[in-house]
Structures are given as C-alpha cells and as structure tokens.
Image (spheres, rainbow, N blue to C red):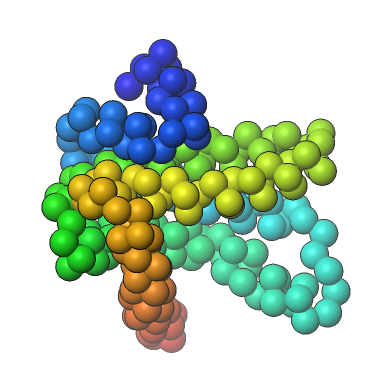
Amino acid sequence: MTYDGFKPLFVLTLKSPRAAARQILAMDLPPQALWLALSLVSVLTSLIFSGLLQMAELPEGDVGEMARGSPGYSSPLIFALMQWGRAVLSIFVLLWVGQTLGGQGRLVDVLAVITWLQVVGFCVILALSVAGLILPFVTTLGFFAFFVWWPWAVVGFLDEAHGFNSPIKAFGVLLMSVLGVLIGLSIFMGAVLSLFAGLTGGV
C-alpha cells in the first residue's frame, strides 16, 4: 500500500470505520504479510507506551509503586511479548466468538481488519505522543477522544468482518473476546514466567 492509498483509507477509518472495513476486506491481503504487520505494530506500540511511562513523572504512594512494578515500566521487553501474545490470541478469540454467534468471517478477514485497526491506533498514539511534547493539554483531550473512538471502530470492523449487520452482536463479540483474551493471556504469561524462572534458576 502506497502513501497515496494509505492516507485516504486512514482518514476514512477515523470518519467511517464500516466503509474502511469494507475496503480492507476487498483488498484480500495475504495472511503472511498481515501476521507480520500485526506482530510488528503490536511490539512497536508497546515499546512506545513503555517509553512514555518511563518519561512520565509517577506519583508517590501506592499508585506510583504499582506503575513502577508493572511490566510496561520495569520490563519493557516482557511487556512487548505480552502485547504480541495478546494481539495474536485476540485474532483467534474474535474469530471463534464471532462464529459462535453466527458470524461468517474467516480467519483472514478478522486478521485483516484488526491488523489495520492496530496500524491506525499506532499512528494516532505516535502522533499524539509527539504533540504532547508541545501541547500536553490538547494531547490529553486527543487521547480521551481516541479511547472513546476505539470501541466504536472495533465494533464496526467486527460487524463487517463477520457479516452480522448487527452492531449489538459485534459488541457482544468484543466484550466476550476481551474476557477470553485476558484469561488466555494470564495462562500464557504464567507459562512464560515459569519457564523463565526455571531457566534462570538452573544457571
């Protein structure tokens, strides 16, 4: 995708997620490229978040200690691994939950729309982070608007990918998938941390 094609699709995604989703699905993008793009953007987004957390002035007390003890602050690479695992797991959970509720989406369809949303999210977060160096207050409003926009966009994309024609069903897929991903990621990270502890303990 060239810049001339990227820019109008990016703007369309912000204004009309459903129309953008239809364009993404019509492209019939190769799965290998989509998996690579999803992995790359997930890791980059997590590293940017960790960087912002490192530069932020954390408050004193329990809130500050909690932030300092989080993987995003203390272990950026582990946090990036967690976000990569969450992204990959979310694709399969969104597919399975959607099909359980009668959706007709294929794996490549869900992969395409979620990957594109991750790319858009990465670009927005990066732009807001840079703008925050100059206009912190405006950036705060921008992040608030983004977090309001994000669920609306995800619901629209899922609705198109699964062919529901029902935002309520798509919203149900989103809610059920969030719970499923949280449980799955907890199990995944527990296994990774246990393996890491076993390897370091044996040295």
Residue 199 picture quarter = bottom left
Q: Position of residue 15 (x, y in %)?
A: 49, 32
Is residue 180 in view from this perspective?
yes
Q: Position of residue 35 (x, y in %)?
A: 27, 45
Please name whichever residue, 74 or 44, is drawn nearer the observer in this view of the structure: 44
Instruction: Identify the residue at horizontal 17%, vertical 32% (top origin).
Output: 28
Instruction: Identify the residue at horizontal 69%, vertical 35% (top origin).
Output: 130
Q: Is residue 125 left or right of residue 36?
A: right
Please name whichever residue, 140 or 193, is drawn nearer the observer in this view of the structure: 140
Residue 69 picture quarter = bottom right
Q: Is residue 110 left or right of residue 184?
A: left
Q: Is residue 69 above or below residue 84?
A: below
Q: Position of residue 140 (x, y in %)?
A: 74, 47
Q: Is residue 68 above or below residue 127?
A: below
Quadrant including the N terminus = top left
Q: Is residue 201 above or below residue 179?
A: below
Q: Position of residue 160 (x, y in %)?
A: 27, 44
Report the residue that reaches farthest toward the top.
4
Q: Is residue 171 above or below residue 135?
A: below
Instruction: Identify the residue at horizontal 44%, vertical 20% (top origin).
Output: 8
Report the residue that reaches farthest toward the right.
60
Instruction: Identify the residue at horizontal 59%, vertical 63% (top origin).
Output: 72
Q: Is residue 100 left or right of residue 60?
A: left
Please name whichever residue, 185 or 106, is drawn nearer the observer in this view of the structure: 106
Quadrant including the C terminus = bottom left
Figure disc tally: 0
Is residue 90 in view from this perspective?
no
Please name whichever residue, 119 or 10, is drawn nearer the observer in this view of the structure: 10
Residue 157 picture quarter = top left
